[in-house]
Image: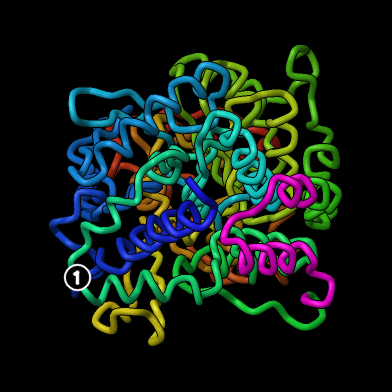
Amino acid sequence: MNQKTLSFLIIFVLCLAVASCYFETTDDGLSDELSEYFYTRTETGDDERFPFLGFDLSSGRITASDDHHIFRSINKPFEEIALTTFNKYKKYAEHHRNIVETSLDKSSFVHKRYITTYPFEWTSGMIKDAFLFNLKLALDLKKYGLLLIDPAPNNTVFDYTRPVFVDFGGILADDFSPKYVNRITNEEWKRYILDIEEREPEIFQKFAKAFVLLSYGKYDLARKMLMNRHRMYILGKNVEDNADIVQSVKTHKLKTHTLSDDLYRSLIKKVEAISVSASPHQFNYNYYKNKNENFDFKDRKNWKQKQNSIYEILNRYKPETVIDIGCNTGWFSILAERTGARVISIDSDEAVVDYLYQYSKEHNLNILPLKINFENLDKKYYVKIGSDCEFSETCKNVALYAAPILRLKSDMTFCLALVHHLVLHFGMSAEKVMNILARITRKVLVLEVPSLDQVILSNLSYYRYARDIKKENYGVECFINEGKKYFKKFRIYPSTPESRTIIVFEK
């Protein structure tokens, strides 16, 4: 197959993938008929359609799912492509585990199901690693006669600290026939495909631009770019002048519609040399050290009461999964992982959660760190598709991202040294806090509640809502009363200092 034909077919498949994103919306944001969404309901009645990642409509429909697998049919026009790709994938999978584990059951693919996270929730180090992962994946696939045709950020997830490409339709055997192009009868789509070569390919550019923004400390803008699946953001002049990584992708793709091996290697070398780590907030970064609580996990003789209580709780309930909300640099996340749990760790601090990611990656821990604010746990993410999109009827706000509360539910929830910040600093009600915690918890909630001790009362400039707080609005008794709405029983454990109390709620 010559280079021109191959380039045309790659663009054609990309075109279909983009089209699937446009056609997937209706008046309420999601189509009832689209099988890439499934319904889920939490214990308190949350009812939303949950979007799977990495599955476009061009090559097949998701027909079913369970806790561990996703089942997808293969569309008839794509059967030959899909089967040829699958046979080459099997040889690749003998030596690599970085593409979604996939098997073939009659006329359907069976894919392993991973925890759904989105690029705008990843730490800065995870975004960099995902960019490098896709560049290296493209090179590796070529050795097996496969092409990476859709390296979009949303097509990668993290299996804890290990990036995995989950869009099986986003890889393609390099020897398929152009006869499939001729099956398109819609004249509008034919014109669209012919015009696509005049457009600027944006798949790798989005990753590249987000990475460059991170390298300049523009974390919020980078996340905003990664959140919007349909529109690119322009880099500011002070960044654009030095963004040779983006320019390399742009110039090369406009000429050839595919990246050469040499350019891949050059980009990998450049990306690896650039740091995207956030400057740490000194207090948070040294949180456990400043409290003299950065204990050795193997030696318990110096542990304080809080550490011993959490250790006892973990061994009593033996959770398979834990979510640590407000994890900081993750001492308790690591403790939970060491007792056998798979852990999701979230924090709003860019630096500390990335520190935990780097530590977990270095020690090969089953910990998935994410940058998420507590108040966003039950937030529905809406993305505006702009007026310049191809099909005007879909140019509206659509719910493309499921709330974390639906995706990150775990057997046990840690909420340690956090509720006084939520209630006494941010002004969130205890009722709202417990509602969110109950909905993300499958079995056991471990909640630490500090009393209005001297530390809080001497810092009313920060804990500004503590001045007028009442007993029914904050305190151990208040949280127990709120917890009884969602949990069947509770236990009390001591913490450190003595002015803090750990409440363990059970469903």
- The colour mode here is rainbow
Amino acid type of disc 1? Asn
Q: Is residue 383 left or right of residue 106?
A: right
What stretch of residues is rendered in magenta? 240-268
Q: Nearer the viewer, residue 300 or 21?
A: 21
Rendered view: 387 above or below 297: below
Residue 321: percent from the left, percent from the top? Answer: 45, 27
Task: Answer with left or right where residue 240 lies relative to residue 166.
Answer: right
> Looking at the picture, how far across and down is residue 190, in whole percent?
29, 71
Picture layout, residue 141 above or below residue 377: above
Q: Is residue 359 magenta?
A: no
As drawn, 393 above or below 415:
below
Q: Residue at x 59, y 55 (%)?
A: 258
Asked if the magenta segment contains residue 258, the reply would be yes
Rendering coords of residue 463 (x, y %): 65, 65
Residue 2, horizontal then vertical, whole percent = 51, 50
Return the residue nearer the eye: 249 or 339: 249
Disc 1 crowd, CA 10 A, few/some/many (<14, 14-19, 20+): few
- Work out whether 4 lies above or below 412: below
The structure residue drawn at horizontal position 83% and vertical position 77%, both measured from the top left corner, is 241
For disc 1, the marked residue is 186
Q: Nearer the viewer, residue 185 or 426?
A: 185
